[in-house]
Amino acid sequence: MSNQKPGTGKHEDKDVDVSGEVSGVFISRDGNVVNLDKKPVQAWNLAAFALLTVAIIAFVVFVLSKNSPTPVPAATLVPATAIIFTATTEPTLSPTDTFEPTLTPLPLTDTPVPSVTPFPPVAIGEDWKAGCISTLWRAYPSNVPPVEKGNGCWKEPVYVFSAENGDLDFLSERESGSPETYGLFAPLPESGTLTFTVRLRDLDNADLWMGVFPEQDVYSQGLLMTILNGDVKKRSFVQKDPATYETIQGTVALSQGNGFSISFTFTNLSVRSRVNPNVFMTNQVSIPTAQKWLFLGYTGLRGAYRIEGTFLNFKLKQ
């Protein structure tokens, strides 16, 4: 037995040796030292802990990303010099743009312009046969020009003259007034013989005029033949001076019958007249012009007058 009291005994002479992998020292109630060996930590526990930590962090990030706005990426500025338009680029027109088409001039060409060709005049001598007064005839006086029909003829009547059935008819009358002269001029060739007939129905205070002149003027120096007013059954031909109207010479009274026939023969120097058939012939009258004019007309004397008749059998030989 020992004399040591419980709780008071000590092993003063013994050392406590702690070495190795000691995880702890435990001293028992009786003073004895108990050594606790270190137990190793298993690896799978560490891996599970790491995965749990990562899962918690990912969950927190996901929740925070849902509650925060999505950042808009900043626009990247492109330098102006980086945009290059090529020849095929067509810019879009704005509503205010005005489209102006490009006009390409066409080469000029000598395109003939159709023109109205006047109808050629009907030949003198052929016109009456066609019931036409040719536009070659010139009205006298010329203060009231005739109107063309468009077929080489004048609209009728021309003053008091109308063509019909190969004849040239005339009719004029008035109650009073001064002397007046009306008629038609026609151009003649340089030389030739002209023959025609005149039939009179009335010759009351009017004289019938027929002649050849150097110009379209009955008072110019030409050859003027007249049938003076009176009974138309028997009349005489009288040569008159155009300027003074004085009598130069004439015929005896002739019976009209089917009409009075007269001819004018002219050259480039002169003209003379013959009352057919070889009843009377005038002297030559000098008209030294290539262009001569035939005149057919009348003079109404002072006061009232009436004249009616027909020119016919018109023949021109050159």
Image (cartoon, helix red, strand yellow):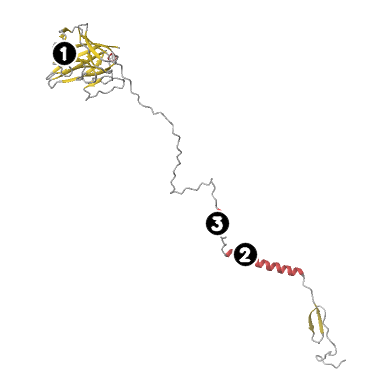
- Foreground mark, 1 or 2? 1
Q: Which mark is residue 79?
A: 3
* Secondary structure type for disc 3: loop
How many residues crowd around disc 3 within 10 Å: few (fewer than 14), some, or many (20 or more)? few
Q: Which residue is drawn at 81% across and 84% down?
A: 33
Picture layout, residue 291 above or below residue 98 = above
Q: Which mark is residue 62?
A: 2
* Outermost residue, right side: 1
Q: Which residue is drawn at 79% across and 82% down?
A: 25
Choose the circle earlier in sequence order: 1 or 2: 2
Q: What residue sits right under mark 1 in the picture?
A: 248
- Foreground mark, 3 or 1? 1
Q: Which residue is drawn at 16% across and 13% down?
A: 248
Q: Position of residue 262 (x, y in %)?
A: 22, 10
Choose the circle earlier in sequence order: 3 or 2: 2
Q: Which of 103 and 196 is in front in this view?
A: 196
Choose the circle earlier in sequence order: 3 or 1: 3
| Residue 46 in view of the camera | yes
Q: Residue at x 68, y 67 (%)?
A: 54
Q: How far apart are marks 3 and 1 (CA)?
A: 116 Å
Q: Residue 148 carries which label?
A: none
Q: Where is residue 172 in the image (x, y as percent from the top left)?
A: 18, 18
Q: Say if mark 3 contacts mark 1, CB within 8 Å.
A: no
- What's under tag 1, amino acid-wise? Ile
- What's under tag 3, amino acid-wise? Pro
Give residue 32's quadrant in the image. bottom right
Q: Where is residue 203 in the image (x, y as percent from the top left)?
A: 15, 14
Q: How far apart are marks 3 and 2 (CA)?
A: 38 Å
